[in-house]
Image (cartoon, coloured by chain):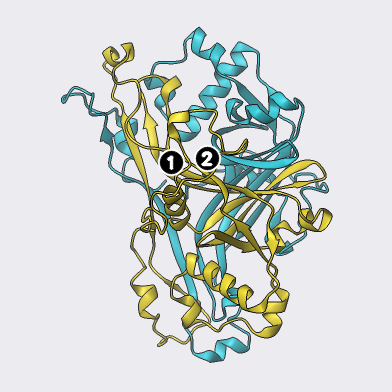
Chain colours: A yellow, B cyan
Amino acid sequence: MTSPAPSPSPGRTLPETARTRHRRLREQGSLDRGALDAVLAAGFLCHLGVVVDGTPMVVPTVYGADGDTLYFHGSVASRSLIASPGAGVCVTVTHVDGLVLARSVFEHGVNYRSAMVHGTPRPVTDPEEKLAGLRCLTEQAAPGQWDYARRPSRKELAATSLLALSLDEASVKIRTGPPDDGDGPDAALGLWAGVLPLHTTWGALEPDPALPADLAPPAHLTARAASPA
Amino acid sequence: MTSPAPSPSPGRTLPETARTRHRRLREQGSLDRGALDAVLAAGFLCHLGVVVDGTPMVVPTVYGADGDTLYFHGSVASRSLIASPGAGVCVTVTHVDGLVLARSVFEHGVNYRSAMVHGTPRPVTDPEEKLAGLRCLTEQAAPGQWDYARRPSRKELAATSLLALSLDEASVKIRTGPPDDGDGPDAALGLWAGVLPLHTTWGALEPDPALPADLAPPAHLTARAASPA
């Protein structure tokens, strides 16, 4: 999850709202639309927050980002959305880049990139948009598979509930670099300080045991195996 | 995040509640307390869900799990908890283990381990419990650092807001193994299917540029660098 794509929207700024205003650690916050696109492009798993009976529920699920829209499966949010259609959600995508190891415990932290999108998702009912949304979602996690695997049948498409969330209300937080106590009094303690990076990589392909032995994986998968995610 | 520790609670079963009952993909759900402990022990970052002005907010933050308690910083939840003390939260921890590449797009999915904890967090005010909670939180992300780095001063301790959440209401979902369409009609399509695993590893230590050149990192950090996370 460390290969941010070039942003399609350089220079655009997201609107500041009560929910996207950065109140803590202001220096890490950003309303830059390009930064948002890069964080979303670098992953495929989000944490979806919904309110069920007045309490929050946070569910991991896959997403696809396409222009100004974020797509995700409606089924994961069903309890909430059936109970109160039109209810707001929060979608958060986080990449952990490393541990910040400071001289003091107090200054320890995490280098990360995180995007938070707020809004009321819209059910996708138009079959063409649904197909395009599912393609986006599939290709975000597994590029090349939409053209390689069998596409959804009409029945499968009908059984799939897809939601679209606008990227209009969103914010990004990013922390990079060494600990912050390198020029403070703790620097005299003689303790090592720095960053322990965390890397995510794809492993070697594991064929389904049900496959015939001579069935080779397609090039788009062999190219991805053992590469940085 | 792939080294689950031995469970301290083998065989214990978590109570089923309206929030922890598994409604979707039931076969992946578990109320086994040992499974919960293993998922929590394998990571250090959670997504914390709170309700702010009736809408959900999902924030990434570090946690520490100690016996029946999960500790996290109160500052991340401050907007919600100041607005409505005693409000419920949902803490979700997810490890992505790989992509499930099926013959059909419809059967594509993710191998993952996820824990979801529900409850109303309790502010930790007792200084001794606060210190123990912060130690737990620090050691979960960066084992060895509590003894190595400078511990929190009385002033830093007072400035830190710590919350404790009981693990009593929690559930686990796990998906492992190959795609599910190996014995269906799509198996005849002649398409490759299997799993593309995702691995998380620690990189090489990056010294703070402010460090003296001859200051060597401690053994607990050099041992961890370049090992599986």
Q: Which residue is mark 2?
A: B45
Please tell me in which quadrant of the rendered image residue B176 appears.
bottom right
Q: Residue furthest left?
A: B214
Amino acid of disc 1: Tyr
Where is residue B43 drawn, in percent x and y? Answer: 51, 42
Looking at the picture, does residue A208 appear above or below residue B45?
Answer: below
Classify residue A132 as left or right of residue A216: right
Where is residue A162 drawn, in percent x and y? Answer: 66, 67
At horizontal 49% and vertical 13% (from top left) the residue drawn is: B156
| Residue B5 in view, yes or no | no
Looking at the picture, does residue A52 appear above or below residue A82?
Answer: above
Q: CA distance from mark 1 to mark 2?
A: 11 Å
Amino acid of disc 2: Leu
Q: Please tell me how crowded label 2 is: few (under 14), some (14-19), or many (20+) other residues with Cα within 10 Å.
A: many
- The mark total stands at 2
Q: Badge 2 sits on which subunit?
A: B
Which of the two residues, A121 or A210, is positioned nearer the viewer here? A121
Please tell me in which quadrant of the rendered image residue B181 appears.
bottom right
Which of the two residues, A193 or A20, is positioned nearer the viewer here? A20
Classify residue A22 as left or right of residue B117: left
Classify residue A53 as left or right of residue A146: right
Which of the two residues, A115 or A19, is positioned nearer the viewer here? A19
Where is residue B225 drawn, in percent x and y? Answer: 32, 41
Q: Please tell me how crowded label 1 is: few (under 14), some (14-19), or many (20+) other residues with Cα within 10 Å.
A: some
Q: Which residue is mark 1?
A: A112
Decide: marks 1, 2 in contact (CB < 8 A)? Answer: yes
Classify residue B24 as left or right of residue B125: right
